[in-house]
Image: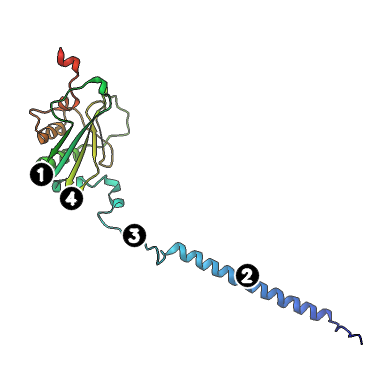
Amino acid sequence: MPVSRKRTSPGSRRRVARLVSTAAGAAALAAATAAGVAACGSGSTPSASHPAAPSSPGSTGSLAANGSGLCQAATQVDSLTVQRSDALPGNHARFAFPATEQVHNAPRAQSVAQSLCGLKPVSHMQVACPADFGVSYKLTFAAGTHQFTPVTLNAAGCEMVHGLGEVRRVTASDVVWRRLGIAIGIPQPDQASFAGTSATSANS
């Protein structure tokens, strides 16, 4: 015997459509709210598995503006290593001291550090520089077991100093050369002692 299908009135169909639409909208709103909360939470606070690194006065970030922190701790320095580099060995420059020197006299090492920190930063103006013969020095200061970022200075040319935050400049008349020479035991040191003597001038 055939079964007759129940006929649905137009009004009933409209009510069912509204209910389905309302339920779908509520589900979408709930999903969007949950996603927004999750995104805000991940951006505003560190997660438990990846906590933020604590900051301290001795951290690298706090010292970025002042270089290695050497100038703030110059009176604590107790040793110094001086290493010479020659970018133009073909010039056959001669020196009265070895390419590497160790200074374990704390007052002398501190005197060199303080003289470097007393140099003024280089202005943004262009300066005329004499010939650069490629001789430079890397000075590594230490306080106990802590080594500061090396300071490099050129013995000729513009005689720039790097490693103390802002770039500085040392001239031939600055006390830096004399104090550095005294620290490594050079008699009557000056800028020329560190620039070296060419083989030609030495034989003349």
Q: What SS does tag 1 mark?
A: helix
Name the residue tied to disc 2: 28
- Mark 3 crowd level (few <14, some 14–19, many ≥20, 10 Å Cα): few
Residue 194: x %, y % from top left:
17, 28
Foreground tag (4 vs 2): 4
Q: Position of residue 39 (x, y in %)?
A: 50, 64
Q: Earlier in the sequence, mark 3 or mark 4?
A: 3
Question: Which sits in the foreground, 19 or 128?
Answer: 19
Disc 3 from disc 4: Cα separation: 24 Å
The quadrant in which residue 84 appears is: top left
Look at the numbered disc 4 and give the secondary structure of its residue.
Answer: loop
Labelled pair 4, 2 in contact (Cβ < 8 Å): no
Residue 192: % across, % down: 16, 24
Residue hosting label 4? 145
Would you name the residue on which mark 3 appears? 53
Q: Is residue 55 left or right of residue 185?
A: right
| Label located before the other in sequence (3 or 1) | 3
Q: Residue furthest front?
A: 1
In the image, 123 versus 33, the foreground residue is 33
User: Residue 106, which numbered label?
Assistant: 1
Residue 86 drawn at (x, y percent):
25, 27
- Disc 3 marks a residue whose amino acid type is Ala
CA separation in Å, label 3 and label 2: 38 Å
For the residues marked 4 and 2, what is the alpha-carbon distance in whole angstroms? 61 Å
Quarter of the image with the N terminus is bottom right
Closer to the eye: label 4 or 1:
4
Tag 1: residue type?
A: Ala
Q: Residue at x 23, y 39 (%)?
A: 151
Q: Are marks 3 and 2 in contact (CB under 8 Å)?
A: no
Q: Residues within 10 Å of mark 4 (few under 14, many from 20)?
A: few
